[in-house]
Image: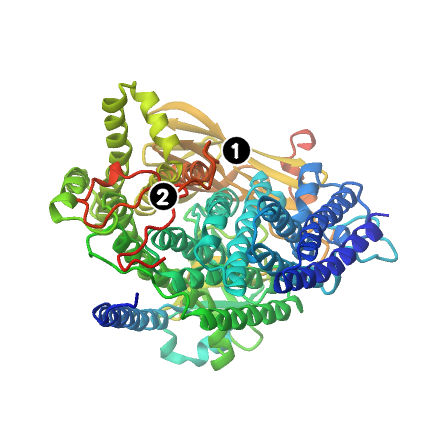
Amino acid sequence: MTMPTRSLSRRGAIVLGVVVILATFGYLVSGKIGSNLVYFLTPSELLARGTRAYGQSVRLGGQVTPGSVKWDANNVDLRFTLQDGTSHVDVHSHGAPPQMFRDGMGVVVEGRYDANGVFEAHNLLVKHSNEYRPPQPGERPSEMYKTLIPDSRP
Amino acid sequence: MMGPLGSSALLVALALTVFGLCVSVLGARQHRPQLIRAGYAATYTNFGLLLIANLAMVVALVTHDFSISYVAQVGSRSVPLFYTIISLWGALEGSILFWGLVLTGYAAAVVWANRHRPGTLVPYAAATLFGIAAFFLILLVGPANPFHTLSPIPPDGPGPNPLLQNHPLMAVHPPFLYLGYVGMSVPFAFAIGALLSGEHDDEWIRTTRRWTLAAWGFLSFAIVAGMWWSYEVLGWGGYWAWDPVENASFMPWLTATAFIHSVMVEERRGMLRVWNVSLVVATFLLTVLGTFLTRSGILSSVHAFTEGVVGYYFLAFIAVVLVLSLVLVAGRSAELRSRGRLDSALSRESVFLLNNLVLTAFMFTVLLGTIFPLVAEAVRGARVSVGAPFFNQMTLPLATLLLLLVGIGPSLPWRSATPEQAWRQLRLPTIVGIATAIVSVALGVREPMAVIAFSFAAFSLLANLQQFARATASRMRLHQEAAPVAFARVVGGNRRRYGGYTAHIGLITVAVAIAASSTFRYEREATVRRGEGVSLRGFTVVLDRLWGRDEPRRFVIGADLSVQESGRTVGHMTPRLNFYRQSEQPVATPAVRSRPAGDLYVNLMAFERDGSQATLRVLVEPLVGWIWVGGAVVALGALIAIWPGARAPLRAPRPVVPAAEPLREPLDEDADEGIPAEPAAEGAR
């Protein structure tokens, strides 16, 4: 038995309804994506954006400038400078640095650049370099932290 | 020894797969039973060959045979046996090898279960599974061969990725994920088989119903186990970050969930037939896409393996599957016309339609957010990622709507209900839902979405519990049985339905736990000296001592902490930092104190070398442990639904209920098990 015409037009209405809902939804999604993009930038690229960079969600990648790290353990407050050879950006984060955090290492920070010229980071990731570099003598955790091994404590 | 054994097993398997594909198609086209049986035999043999290859790899790993490339890549003499064995799926090549084992295992099992079934559906499905297996075997003998022989033989290896040897959940999450992912190949193969053979009369759905549910149950369990792993290992106290690979596991779950609902509409009403085939194809494609995203290293992610050529193979495979499926569905679209139509907006099938719409929208949102960075980089050259707020803002309304539908669906009968009937079912849940909202606000919940989530969850929980209670009560009345007996017989008599409601209850539990733990999460980071403590929400965590320990594969720093509650010491916790030999960055092992009301979670962030002070991150997360419990309940629901019944699966059709018969309460409906779809009103068939 063939489908009655009534149900065909009804099906058309349903299809139309679904299309309208999906179109509205697609519009919403595309708008929301635009306002939630996180850009991967280097310090030079960030500074090149000028005032447009303020308040934008950014993942900033660079090297920790030697001698710039100020870690205030009592207030769990960390400040350092991130550089890429040509430019450098001051970074501030309320949170502890990763244990192996040190001068010159590659770091990615997530956060926003504010109008004071400070990058307020809420997340700090140490970059895994592609090539494995065996720790130098004195860098091995077992040597660095041997004071914590109960039997070897002086 | 193990290298040549594994390599040759894979080569023979590839040859046998091509043979099986050819004889299955030829046998089906020319109706030659010998060829079909030869294809079936190839399926079983293939499974045996993959089993040999996987065992060879496990033996090579355990005996530290570093002449084999994969062992040299992930093995290490210092790693304990347990982590050595599970490093089988710890990196790209091994995981594809394991994938091949699961795929051929499913193929052998599904062919064995259907070997006496007449017609050409099963041979075509077997051919499809051979096609998928051929793809993975080409990867295994080509670019992802784990059995390469190395010369000179390295004396030792680096061991698995530190994140993967830090927690025993790595023995649970990946295999279950593969069982779920690969299991979606079975309904896909049968859908393609149905389209190729022309035997698309819902037969393929009944044949694969249990397989689909099993794969869905595995996938649900794997996703929750992955959340748990992330919570226990990554140290930030969260369990879901909208990481591309988390999304990759979640997207096929969404379409598979849509399918296991809409398939009931096809079985009962003969509707949504093209839609169901599309969902099955989409689910399968999303599992392949997920593998591509994980394995190609194209997106930055905690899961990403190294970059390589394997990604292009996956892209080509996705393209081929997509085009073939579209051509097949388009070719059969006239025959796949709907045999029924929607009678009423107030019916279970219309709730299922809505649920499918929401789940599909959900999937598209996640898909867009996940692949947008790829598109942006290709088109504009900008390196971007899509922030978690996008996913949270977009999916929260959809998830909330689903939470409501989970309660409405079971309360409405098939075909149509009068508003009075619907209200009789929904009255009590509605009252409880509103009461929950009022109580939440009175107790100080100010987050509107949390109030809505709790209220909807209470509504849906009651609606599902009510189904158990009403059926049990009516059985107690009718058969004069005690409550536990009646309950057991109600559930046993219609496992599919009550398994479904059990899964609903698990899902509601997960939803409440996520809403509570994300809304009322308290966090504090502080540096303390020995003997000092950090206080948060009534707990004080006191640093007693810092210690270090040199282990063969890692160096461990631990902080012994006492937990005090209102001045009394109630327990001890030891968060640790593990420095693995092959990585500069330590991997944390947070300490978690789980109670039904919530977790206390402490992570060691930093410490002084002399042991005088440590920086701790302390979190209090209410109800978070219920996420894992809820996940287990969802899996239990799937298990109940697929548990084989005592009855023969194919029994004589029930007398057809005339459409004019007055509607019955939904709880009086008889079993869904094995009932052919009711002929549509038009009288098709």
Question: Which amino acid is tagged 2?
Answer: Leu
Q: CA distance from mark 2 to mark 1?
A: 32 Å
In the displayed image of the protein, which residue is found farthest to the right?
B152
Q: Secondary structure at mark 2?
A: helix
- Subunit that carries the residue with mark 2: B
Up/down of B315 relative to B280, above or below: below
For mark 1, name the chain.
Answer: B
Is residue A146 in view?
Answer: yes
Give the residue displayed 50% in from the left and 73% down from the top: B327
Return the disc, 2 or 1, that comes first in the chain's sequence.
Answer: 2
> Looking at the image, is B212 positioned above or below residue B189?
above
Above or below for B8 versus B635: below
- At 44% across and 57% down in the image, what residue appears? B201
Of the two numbered discs 2 and 1 in the rendering, the one whose residue sits closer to the viewer = 2
Foreground: A5 or B303?
A: A5
Q: Residues within 10 Å of mark 1 (few under 14, many from 20)?
A: many
In the drawing, does residue B595 fall left or right of residue B375? left
Identify residue for label 2.
Answer: B507
Local crowd at mark 2 within 10 Å, few (<14), some, or many (≥20)? Answer: many
Q: What residue is shown at x 71% (from left), y 41% (from top)?
A: B79
Circles 2 and 1 on the same chain = yes
Measured along the vertical axis of the image, is residue B656 above or below residue B386?
above
- Residue at the location (65% across, 37% down)? A147
Q: Amino acid at mark 1?
A: Thr
**Scheme by which the image is coloured:** rainbow
**Residue highlighted by disc 1:** B574
Does dot 1 land on a helix, a strand or a loop?
A: loop
Q: Locate residue B434: give its quadrant.
A: top left
Viewer-nearest residue: B39 or B80: B39
